[in-house]
Image (spheres, helix red, strand yellow):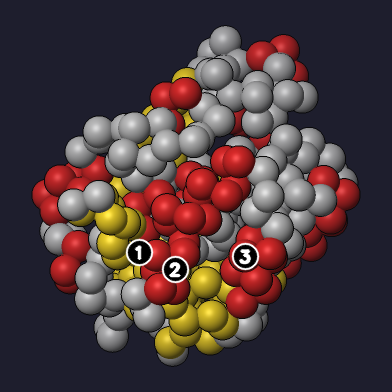
Amino acid sequence: MHWKVGKVKITKVVELETVGSTRFILPLASNEEIRKLPWLIPHFANEEGRLKMSIHSLVVETPSRRIVVDTCLGNNKEGRSVPTWNNRQGPFLDTMHEAGFPPESIDTVLCTHLHVDHVGWNTKLVDGRWVPTFANARYVFGRGEYEHWRDHSGEPEKAAVFKDSVQPIVEAGKADLVADNARLCDEITLIPTPGHSPGHISIHIRSDGEDALLTGDVAHHPCQMAHLEWSSTADSDPVQSAVTRRELFSRFADTPTLVIGGHFNAGRIRREGDAFKFIV
């Protein structure tokens, strides 16, 4: 899928798509509750009320940069809590190449946060070692996010993710640690959006008077626009994540801004009562 925002082109490259099996991440999003939000169907849920979600990267092409935003799960990774995420042998790099983005053509990798499904293709396994997948790229991490996981990855899965998908980038000298409100180039500015993780960032794109927002995991699904209090089980601070959702969605609601989620497709945010809805 492709979108244009002024001179910027955004391409979605999918690693994994699911329908249902999402209660582990959004336990309050029951089929019954989702059917009460008919605007979600058919783009974001099916008629039964089962959520449609994806794990994907977004390739952002500006006049000066070719950026991969978030890098999915990766192949050959171990120690993941979801069984199907372990030792994957998927065709993601082939898919990127077919879309016109061979790894060597990427000059920047930007991670909205450092969770398992957003950093996996940072690295690939070569002769038993984890090496940067995008050999010509600088990898941009929020400084606060990186320092948090560097110092707080005691749980086995978090330790595994940091060891195989983050630490090798730093050791290779390819990491750039930036402020959570940094400006990366003329078209791209970061927005601090904590809650899902301590240093989570979202991405504001502006070009030729047009705007886009890449939310990352501020919301895993548009149903959280209607239910701001539905925090994900993966949120490090569920209260803060709800506050961040309200603040971010309020900022961009009822504007022409194209909004693309870390796990859902594009639309625009509209106010509805005390909350919001998502319009394709």
Q: Secondary structure at mark 1?
A: strand
Alpha-carbon span between mark 1 and mark 3: 22 Å
The residue that mark 3 highlights is 150
The answer to whether mark 1 and mark 2 are in CB contact below 8 A is yes
Asked where in the image residue 14 lies, by quadrant, the reply is top left
Residue 92 vs residue 60, the one in the foreground: 92
Task: Give, as a three-letter code, the residue at label 1.
Answer: Val
Residue at 82%, 46% (x, y): give it.
Answer: 238
| Residue 125 pos. (x, y %) | 26, 50
Task: Give, as a three-letter code, the residue at label 2.
Answer: Leu
Asked where in the image residue 216 lies, by quadrant, the reply is bottom right
| Residue 180 pos. (x, y %) | 64, 77
The residue that mark 2 highlights is 110
Q: Secondary structure at mark 3?
A: helix
Residue at 43%, 87% (x, y): give it.
Answer: 185
Residue 225 vs residue 123, the one in the foreground: 123
Q: Residue furthest front?
A: 128
Q: Is residue 54 visible?
A: no
Circle number at residue 68: 1
CA neighbours of label 1 inside 10 A, class few (<14), some (14 to 19), many (20+): many
Task: Give, as a three-letter code, the residue at label 3.
Answer: Arg
| Residue 208 pos. (x, y %) | 41, 82
Residue at 65%, 54% (x, y): give it.
Answer: 153
Alpha-carbon span between mark 1 and mark 2: 6 Å
Q: Sequence-wise, which precedes: disc 3 or disc 2?
A: 2
Q: Is residue 194 visible?
A: yes
Relative to 77, say whether 246 is above or below. below
Q: Sequence-wise, which precedes: disc 1 or disc 2?
A: 1
